[in-house]
Amino acid sequence: MKHLSLAERLAAMPGEAARLYLDGLSDGAVAALEFHWPFWARPEQLAPAGDWRTWLILAGRGFGKTRAGAEWVRQIGESIADARIALVAANLAEARSVMVEGQSGLLAIAPESTRPQWEPSLRRLRWPGGAQAVLFSAAEPEGLRGPEHSHAWCDEIAKWDNASGRAMAAWDNLQLGLRVGRLPQICATTTPRAVPLVRRLLDDPGLVISRGSSHANRANLPPAFLAAVERHYGGTALGRQELEGELLEDIDGALWSRSLIEACRIRWSAEGCVRVVIGVDPPAGSSGDACGIIVCALQDDGRAAVLADCSVEGASPEGWARAVANASDAWGADRIIAEANQGGEMVGAVLRASNIALPVRLVHASRGKAARAEPVAALYEAGRVVHCGTFARLEDEMCGLMAGGTYQGPGRSPDRADALVWALTELMLGRRGTPRIRSLET
């Protein structure tokens, strides 16, 4: 029970013992429990003891990182009259909606008597005792150049703009301004991702880290949430990151790295979509590997977008063909690109039998999966491919494809990654990318 909060321990006590404990408290003490964070917090959600400068909470989704950060700020705001606190998020909208006005934000967690006054026009919170907190955007690093602070809470630092360098610039400017008081401190909260800022913090020998999983906060999470994240991430390497709070390390020599994929992740917008294709890597038989089915689009800015992973496992030929047809209908595909090495004309016949009223291009590969993937990986390096969402199993396979031609990812074969390669080759490399591929129109 060492990782349980006092509230969870009380709930686990026999009914009579719990009643005797509560009867021993005054009415005022019982009422005060609602806002007494040490009673509700698990040990890893409480600020560490000692003279630390940076406290990093690196944990899975739903762990309670936001609540822990907000409660740390609340304690400072209520106890240090001259505290000057920076609240930094990926952008100002998130700083306001999550850190201030959110369900676990600073306005929701404090009793009315000590609740700070929120001044939206000034992006400022003011506590009755005199402490102040101001909101900043990590997307605007220059805004942190100049202001001086005694404390800072940085939320979801892995979501900051690491690709452009703004994340690092924002962190550096914040550090340089953290010079008020005897012991300036930063609390950073994030789900782990292999981005430069997170890696830099982990290399700091003076860093204090609290870790935890989504399941540690099971008592406060809707069962539907846990079921959904288990469905999307359970059994994947990415699940270890998103649920268990583990930072995934890259495999030396892999064609893709986690940080490379994270840098190309964006939100999907149907505007500017020029063409949609579906890459298909059929299994060798009904009891073979998964059928890789990946939906990709060409955008009017010249980049390709990965839209969906519709792959199926353990399906019959009719089953995976139906999955391809459903993906085609859902995304309005213009063409199906299917590898035909394993089944030859059978692949085309199965797809035609599923009533797909689209051109199907059958491609025959003369090189291994890793060799075919190398020019596509180069597109990612050049910033010419984006991921519109998180595709756990696909990305696990991509990060297991080695430059030397081997595969060190999950499963026997990177079927999803191979389907991705076929789709992106069609969209981005054209005939230049298929000198060794014989294509048959069906």
Image (cartoon, rainbow, N blue to C red):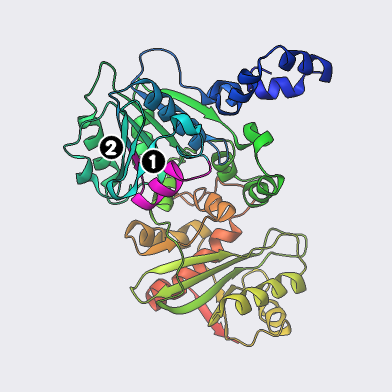
Q: Locate residue 109, reporting x and y percent.
A: 51, 34
- Is disc 1 placed on a helix, strand or loop? helix
Side of 31 where 223 appears, left or right: right
Q: Which residue is mark 2?
A: 171
In the image, which residues are magenta?
87-103
**Dot 2 surroundings within 10 Å: few (below 14), some, or many (20 or more)?**
some
Is residue 9 highlighted in magenta? no
Whether residue 346 is visible to the viewer of this picture, yes or no, is yes
Q: Locate residue 215, reporting x and y percent.
A: 65, 35
- Is disc 2 placed on a helix, strand or loop? helix
For the point 40% across and 24% down, the residue is: 78
For the point 51% across and 53% down, the residue is: 398
Whether residue 91 is visible to the viewer of this picture, yes or no, is no
Q: CA distance from mark 1 to mark 2?
A: 9 Å
Q: Locate residue 125, reporting x and y percent.
A: 34, 38
In the rendered image, the vertical position of residue 100 relative to residue 429, given as above or below: above
Depth check: give the residue in front, 237 or 329: 329
Mark number, residue 157: 1
Task: Pick the quarter of the image with the C terminus.
Answer: bottom right
Q: Amino acid at mark 2?
A: Trp
Mark number, residue 99: none
Task: Pick the quarter of the image with the N terminus.
Answer: top right
